[in-house]
Image (spheres, helix red, strand yellow):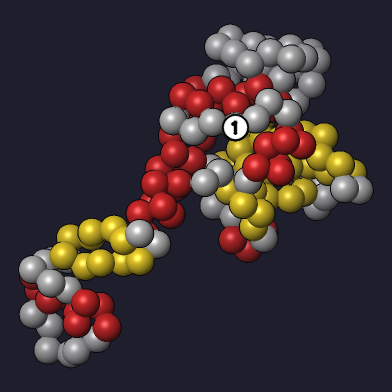
Amino acid sequence: MSAQVHVPSLLVRATTASAMTLAAVGGTLFVPGAAPEAQAAGHSMKALNIAASKKGAPYRWGATGPSRFDCSGLTLYSFKKAGKQLPRTAQQQYNKTRHISASQRQRGDLVFFHSGSGVYHVGIYAGSGKIWHSPKTGAVVRLEKIWTKSVYYGRVG
């Protein structure tokens, strides 16, 4: 699948023949694979903003919003509002995402906390080593620094 990306005419008229300029046709550049990646990034950023908008919502085990959440309930709700479906639990969400390395993580990716091979918590990566999450009974949805290196990262497709 290809995406059409508008290329300013100045770039198209550039004197250096590059692959990008040669690929430009009528001010449009065809970039293989760009549509799914751009669309995924759009959904992820929407989900991140939705999670952030729930700041202060109380934790409740098994809750999926709109006013109370457990960890995977917050991610499920946020991505659903952004137009993407996720399974219910943190482990199921991990199994459904495209696994990525820490160096590939981007804002809006999911952060999965694990013990051994089992995932027990999930949040949405906010950048700068922080996540939006609904941590535990007695707490509220909040932005918090990732407190352990025992995390996996996943991208919602």
Residue extending farthest to the front is: 1
Mark 1: amino acid: Leu
Q: Is residue 153 visible?
A: yes
Residue extending farthest to the right is: 116
Q: Is residue 77 above or below residue 35?
A: above
Asked whether 9 or 96 is in front, the reply is 96
Q: Is residue 131 visible?
A: no
Residue at 59% across, 55% down = 105
Q: Is residue 103 above or below residue 14?
A: above
| Res 58 → quadrant | top right
Residue at 8% across, 80% down = 13
Density class for disc 1 (Cα within 10 Å; few <14, some 14-19, many ≥20) is many
Counting every numbered tag in the picture gives 1
- Residue that carries the numbered disc 1 in the rendered image: 86
Tag 1's secondary structure?
Answer: loop
Relative placement, left or right, of 61 versus 84 is right
| Res 77 → quadrant | top right
Location of residue 107 in the rendering, given as x and y in whole percent from the top left corner:
53, 46
Q: Is residue 86 above or below residue 147?
A: above
Location of residue 129 in the rendering, given as x and y in whole percent from the top left corner:
65, 48
Q: Is residue 43 above or below residue 41?
A: above
Location of residue 82 in the rendering, given as x and y in whole percent from the top left corner:
44, 30
Relative placement, left or right, of 89 versus 155 is right
Residue at 21% across, 67% down = 29
Indicate the quadrant containing the N terminus: top left, top right, bottom left or bottom right: bottom left
Asked whether 40 or 131 is in front, the reply is 40
Residue extending farthest to the bottom is: 16
Relative placement, left or right, of 46 versus 60 is left
Asked whether 33 or 149 is in front, the reply is 33
